[in-house]
Amino acid sequence: MCASVLSACGGSDSSDTDAGGPEKSQDRGPITLASGKDTTGTLQGQLDRWNKQHPDQKVTLVELPESADQQRQQFIQNAQTKSDTYSVLNLDPIWVAEFAANQWIDELPAKEFPLDKMIPAVVKTGEYFGKQYAVPFNTNAGLLFYRKDLLDKAGAQPPTTWDELKQACEKVRKLPEGKGIGCYAGQFDKYEGLTVNFSEAVASAGGSVVDDKGKATVDTEAAKKGLQFLADGFKDGTIPQQASTYKEEDGRRDFQSGKLLFHRQWPYQWTLANAKDGSSEVAGKFGVAALPGLDGPGKSSLGGLDLAVSKFAKNKATALDFIKFFSNEANARTNLKVTSAAPPYTDLYDDPALRKQFPYLATLKESLDTATPRPVVVHYGDATAAIQESAAAALSGSKSVDDALADMQKNLSAAVAAK
């Protein structure tokens, strides 16, 4: 294996790589797994298990930045230079169409994976024109983490609507222990998380960002109501101003330190916020509910991570076998137990022992069943940039909601139509 994965293994020409896909390849040997920053600290342990069993086909973890936008940028730079630095890519599902269309990843042999045991909508995130280009490693749906101890003391219930959320916050803020607490936060920095949170707000108001015919649809009353909820939240103090720079970890840290009443977050927060090592002040004090919406329960964006093989990788037979190992049900069960990551396997949500350990699993399954994908667009970078630019302007107050959505409709339409 190379002494330095980044410096010594990169930049090969495509003629040096296996010309076929992983299904046809017989090439075996060391590979890399390129993945976003492992905030759980558990990936290396899984790689160690593989490496112990495959000493001649070791996998080296290449950690990319925590920010999804920066991860995508590095993945694309690697692909455009036809580098073999990254073998297996741990991708945000929304990038699969873009990477497949640009021939940066290989088609995978769908029949060799237990896809029939996975949630159908999650499996579909790895498809492009009916072919499987990626396999789910985990999945994700946004959930509402809430301070159960404070709601109970205030005589309030977990909210199912935005109005109920604000009313519950007002009650809690009247308590001595609730004075000055931040009411609600999500991921509102100008990055992929803002696209996710905006899309959820629109869907939770009954709208869509891009319809099933591929047309931009943010020039609607539902889209206006969704963005208005977020903009008004910053304006009236429901959402603290510091949340304008929140990514996942920023909000998680503030929720764990007791600064937030409600937090829109992925399931991984459960284990970290329940830590008994002193790192969390809210361990045992919070609950999880579905996201609230305009008139009832809201809708989450579908998240997660999908595994793909780089078109330019060497040792593709090893890469294919590793994905089979890394995405299997046993690993998914372990990931849930250790990190509370949402598994793609349907049966795990009905497992009595897991439900006892993770009482939110039924809520998570319901959220996954109603989750909506972000716009499936080949030029996804342009699409998400259009969303982020206009949404950020509305949240900061530099543009009215109407003007922000008008600009978004124009720029998003151009991104969707681009060939």
Image (spheres, rainbow, N blue to C red):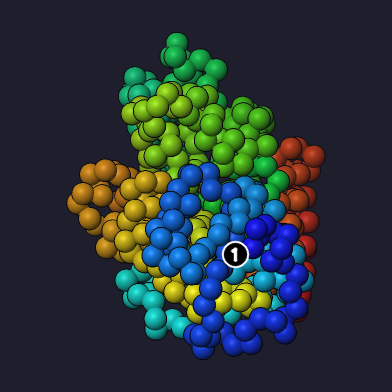
Task: Check the picture and name the quadrant holding the C terminus.
Answer: bottom right
Residue 323, how many percent across, how many down? 46, 70
Left or right side of 15 for 371: left
**Residue 184 visible here:** no
Residue 385, how many percent across, how many down? 74, 57
When asked about the image quadrant of residue 218, the answer is bottom right
Q: Identify the residue shown where x is 61% and y is 76%.
A: 314
Left or right side of 21 for 370: left
Seen from the viewer's position, the closer of residues 319 and 412 is: 319
Placement of 413 over or under 61, stated as above or below: below
Task: Check the picture and name the quadrant holding the N terminus.
Answer: bottom right
**Residue 16 visible here:** yes
Q: Secondary structure at mark 1?
A: loop
Placement of 158 over or under 132, stated as above or below: above
Left or right side of 108 for 337: left
When asked about the image quadrant of residue 120, the answer is bottom left
Seen from the viewer's position, the closer of residues 90 and 49 is: 49
Residue type for callout 1: Met
Residue highlighted by disc 1: 1
Within-10-Å neighbours for mark 1: few <14, some 14–19, many 20+: some
Q: Identify the residue shown where x is 38% and y is 33%.
A: 274
Disc count in the image?
1
Q: Identify the residue shown where x is 74% and y is 50%.
A: 390
Residue 265, how many percent across, how many down? 49, 43
Seen from the viewer's position, the closer of residues 179 and 341 is: 341
Placement of 176 over or under 128, stated as above or below: above
Residue 154, how many percent across, how many down? 37, 20
Residue occupying the far left of the picture: 352
Q: Identify the residue shown where x is 72% and y is 67%.
A: 10
